[in-house]
Amino acid sequence: MLSLLSRLGGLLAAVPFKAWLAAAIVVALAGGVWWHLHQVDGLRDDLADAKQAAKDAERDRDAWMNTAFQRTRELNLERQERAAGETATRALNAQLDTLDQRYLPLRERIELAPDTDDAPVAPVLRQAIEDLP
């Protein structure tokens, strides 16, 4: 072991300082280049991950927007159907009011008729007449 150290010491003395300095600079530059390339590769990977995440977010956003638009269309259709139903209900109520107005004089005449105008009526006919509005 001692002979190895003495040989190494002899090598150190034999090689000039400027050569050692140049070798150290070359090693430092090679290490710097390796470190830089390693950092660039890491940044490229991070950039690829960010681009993929952005694509995923855009896809999710588009799916959400499509769902929202579909629900909005469905809601608008439901509103239209409800409005049509309300219009039909108002029309039916108006029609029923008209029918009530038509039958009102007949009802009053029946109610005001004297008891002598009453006569026996078949039960089925009586029930049908009583069920009229």
Image (cartoon, rainbow, N blue to C red):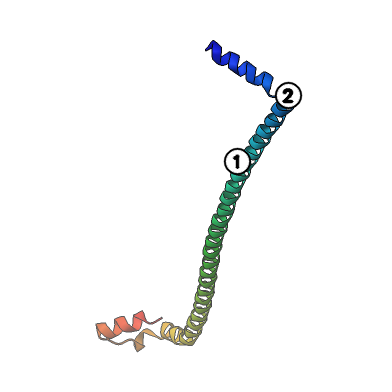
The answer to which image quadrant residue 36 occupies is: top right
Residue plotted at (61% across, 49% down): 47
Give 72 or 35, whichever is nearer the viewer. 35
Q: Work out how far the residue at label 2 is from the one at label 1, CA to CA, in angstroms.
A: 31 Å
Q: Residue furthest top?
A: 2
**At which x and y percent is residue 118?**
33, 86
**At which x and y percent is residue 8?**
60, 18
Q: Secondary structure at mark 2?
A: helix
**At which x and y percent is residue 122?**
25, 86
Residue plotted at (51% across, 63% down): 67
The crowd level at tag 1 (other Cα within 10 Å; few <14, some 14-19, many 20+) is few
**At which x and y percent is residue 41?**
59, 45
Identify whether 96 is placed above or below 66. Answer: below
The crowd level at tag 2 (other Cα within 10 Å; few <14, some 14-19, many 20+) is few
In the picture, the quarter occupied by the C terminus is: bottom left
Give amino acid for label 2: Phe
The answer to which image quadrant residue 80 occupies is: bottom right
Residue 38: mark: 1
Give 22 or 37, whichever is nearer the viewer. 22
Identify whether 131 is placed above or below 4. Answer: below
Give amino acid for label 1: His
Residue 17: mark: 2
Residue plotted at (57% across, 51% down): 48
Give 108 or 113, whichever is nearer the viewer. 108
Q: Secondary structure at mark 1?
A: helix
Quick check: marks 2 and 1 in contact, CB under 8 Å? no
Q: Is residue 95 left or right of residue 128?
A: right
